[in-house]
Image (cartoon, rainbow, N blue to C red):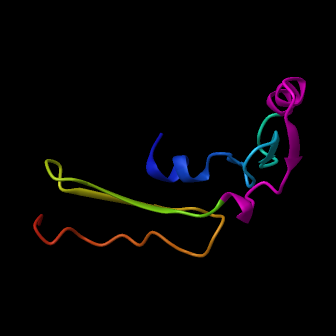
């Protein structure tokens, strides 16, 4: 998975200590949600890209290939804006 795909992947979160409550994004497949319920979890389905899951940005640099990569989660404000590598021309 590349950085952008990883930040866009469906997420889940546990907001409280203890208990079996879990929040999942609506893109988690129904079969997975049903299995969680069967195992005793109390599943709350949020939006497809829920702010409850947090946001994130990521950057990677491949020094050998002189390639920078960046990504930003669609759950929060932010953007990955490409810039040229000043050492590679």
Q: Which picture quadrant has residue 48?
A: bottom right
The residue under the point 18% across, 56% down is 66
The residue under the point 63% across, 64% down is 74
Q: Which picture quadrant has residue 22?
A: top right
The single residue placed furthest to the front in the displayed view is: 18
The residue under the point 72% across, 49% down is 17
Image spot of residue 89 (x, y percent) = 11, 66
Q: Which picture quadrant has residue 88?
A: bottom left
The residue under the point 54% across, 47% down is 5
Say if the magenta span includes residue 8.
no
Please say if 37 is above or below 74.
Answer: above
Image spot of residue 51 (x, y percent) = 72, 65
Please say if 31 is above or below 82.
Answer: above
* In the displayed structure image, the side of residue 10 where residue 32 appears, left or right: right
* In the displayed structure image, the side of residue 68 where residue 72 appears, left or right: right
Image spot of residue 73 (x, y percent) = 57, 62
Q: How many numbered discs?
A: 0
What is the span of residues highlighted in magenta in the rendered image?
A: 30-53
* In the displayed structure image, the side of residue 87 where residue 45 appears, left or right: right
The single residue placed furthest to the bottom in the displayed view is: 77
């Amino acid at each position: 998975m590349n950085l952008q795909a990883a930040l866009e992947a469906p997420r889940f979160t546990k907001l409280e200590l203890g208990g079996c409550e879990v929040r999942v994004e609506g893109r988690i497949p129904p079969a997975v949600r049903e299995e969680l319920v069967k195992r005793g979890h109390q599943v709350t389905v949020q939006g497809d890209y829920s702010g409850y899951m947090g946001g994130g940005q990521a950057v990677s640099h491949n020094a050998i290939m002189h390639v920078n990569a960046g990504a930003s989660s669609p759950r929060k404000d932010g953007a990955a804006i490409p810039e040229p590598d000043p050492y590679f021309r």
